[in-house]
Amino acid sequence: MAELKTKPNKLSVEKYLNSIKDEQKKKDSFNVLELMKKVTKEDPIMWGPSIVGFGKYHYKYESGREGDMCMVGFSPRKNALTVYIMPGFTRYDDLMKKLGKYKTGLSCLYIKKLEDIDMKVLTDLIMESVRWMKRKYS
């Protein structure tokens, strides 16, 4: 089985975020950093070279594959700021309707600019997803 690349490391979160060239994305990233610190009451950790994560859980698939991942995190990708909501979005339909302009993948929330979304709703979404993850994995 291939070794997972997305694992916690000692890289500096601030140094990584300060290396972002796009000033709006850098500003948005620091805002999400502070939001997640406040919601999770955890210190950020780099997961792999580009994910800023908070908390940790252990998963195991029916296939036998297992590993650790952050409970919530984000990454300032080229096309969008990606927020990782690990439980996915189906249980958060009411919040998603009020969030604003975004796209989603399985557990990825893609945001072009924070000004496109309601920050209170994003805060609630992160809070609810972390609460759900802690109940399931703690």
Image: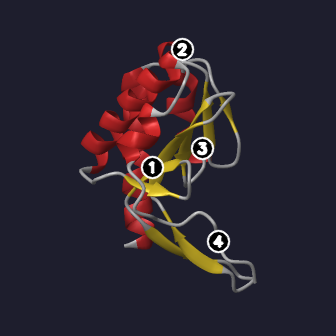
Q: From the viewer's perspective, is 95 left or right of 119? A: right
Residue occupied by mark 4 = 4
Which amino acid type is marked by label 4?
Answer: Leu
- The answer to whether residue 113 is above or below residue 108 is above
Residue situated in front as seen by the camera: 71 or 24: 24
Q: Between marks 4 and 3, how big is the CA–CA gap?
A: 24 Å
Q: Between marks 4 and 1, how big is the CA–CA gap?
A: 23 Å
Q: Position of residue 118 (x, y in %)?
A: 44, 19
Q: Nearer the viewer, mark 4 or mark 1?
A: 4
Residue occupied by mark 2 = 116
Q: Between marks 1 and 2, how big is the CA–CA gap?
A: 21 Å
Say few, some or many: other residues with alpha carbon within 10 Å of mark 2 (under 14 / 14 to 19 / 20 or more).
few
Q: Nearer the viewer, mark 4 or mark 2?
A: 4
Quarter occupied by residue 21: top right
Asked if disc 1 and disc 2 are in contact, CB closer than 8 Å, the reply is no
Which amino acid type is marked by label 2?
Answer: Asp
Residue occupied by mark 3 = 89
Residue occupied by mark 1 = 129
